[in-house]
Image (cartoon, rainbow, N blue to C red):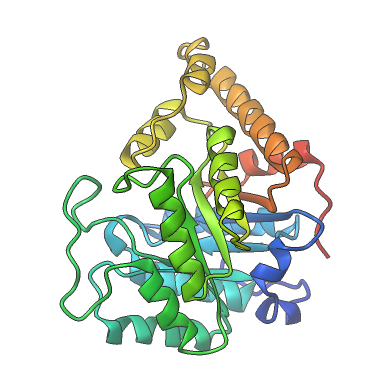
Amino acid sequence: MAYGTASSMERAERFTRSIPAMVRAERPSISFEFFPPKDDAAEAQLWQAIRHLEKVAPSFVSVTYGAGGGTRDRTVRVTGRIAQETSLTAMAHLTCVGSPVTELRSVVGHYASVGIRNVLALRGDPAGGLGTPWTTHPEGLDHADGLVALVKGLGDFTVGVAAFPDGHPESGDLGADVETLLRKERAGAEFAITQMVFDVDNYLRLRDALARRGSLLPVVPSIMPITNARQVIRMAQLAGQPMPRAVTDRLDRHGEDTAAIRAEGIEIATESAQRLLGEGAPGIHFITMNRSSAALEVHANLGVPIAV
């Protein structure tokens, strides 16, 4: 199917599906994350991936803002098109980076106008990248809990937030990360999605620490199937979460054999996802890098029933 054309699949429910309800359901939720394309060729690739993944009826999909919020306009446009032209439930990303409250309200209003009712509210990385000081816009917000409250006050939205199993780069310890999530929950957050999970034990520690504090926030782990080891290792470093030695050792033993590295990456992702679901994770959020094949392979390995 040509990218950008309307789906022939049933579309009526995509505007009314609640992500919190899906991640609390008995059946695990399966979702996919994309990033906004930089040019026409990248957009064609994105839409090809979306159409392939649409066939497995995921619970929802999302489009990131990118570092510093610099791809906001593309994110808003692509997310709106997914909502309007496919059968998929689209979750909108929104960050505080470099935006006054009036601008944030305008973006939320646009999302609402195309039928989007699920928002992932993020503070976002500093405009200069991780390791640089965070600078609040003079008329903006400086924490995700404030953004959660803003979105909740603008209409009938369900709002999710980010979680950091390996620790937020600016956080001192697990206790501080738990306190941050509790503040987001008190502000109205109804679910959380993690950064890339490579160490399942760290995810479990965060989830269980939240539960001990009485939190009801479902925490959905993100999995990124490794198909290019150098790219993923670099992404993990930029996110402030170095990959575990157990993962890098498995990749290193294949040297420069790209096919073997890809197969190992699929196996690692499958093993992690299987353990996460076995430990009671409410679902898996796949980071796709705008390609469908690796995520579909791991999805098939899991044997998760297709949602209806």
Residue 90 x/y as whole percent: 59, 70
Residue 60 falls left or right of residue 142: right
Residue 265 falls left or right of residue 54: left
Q: Residue at x 51, y 50 (%)?
A: 194
- Quadrant containing the C terminus is bottom right
- Quadrant containing the N terminus is bottom right
Residue 151 x/y as whole percent: 45, 81
Residue 241 falls left or right of residue 115: left
Answer yes or no: is residue 49 visible. no
Q: Is residue 264 above or below residue 231?
A: above
Q: Nearer the viewer, residue 59 or 160?
A: 160
Residue 60 x/y as whole percent: 64, 64
Residue 68: quarter of image: bottom left
Residue 185 x/y as whole percent: 51, 68
Q: Residue at x 65, y 59 (%)?
A: 51
Q: Nearer the viewer, residue 147 or 109?
A: 147
Q: Residue at x 75, y 60 (%)?
A: 57
Answer yes or no: is residue 307 visible. yes
Q: Residue at x 40, y 70 (%)?
A: 145
Q: Nearer the viewer, residue 58 or 140?
A: 140
Q: Total marks drawn? A: 0
The residue positioned farthest toward the front in the image shown = 213
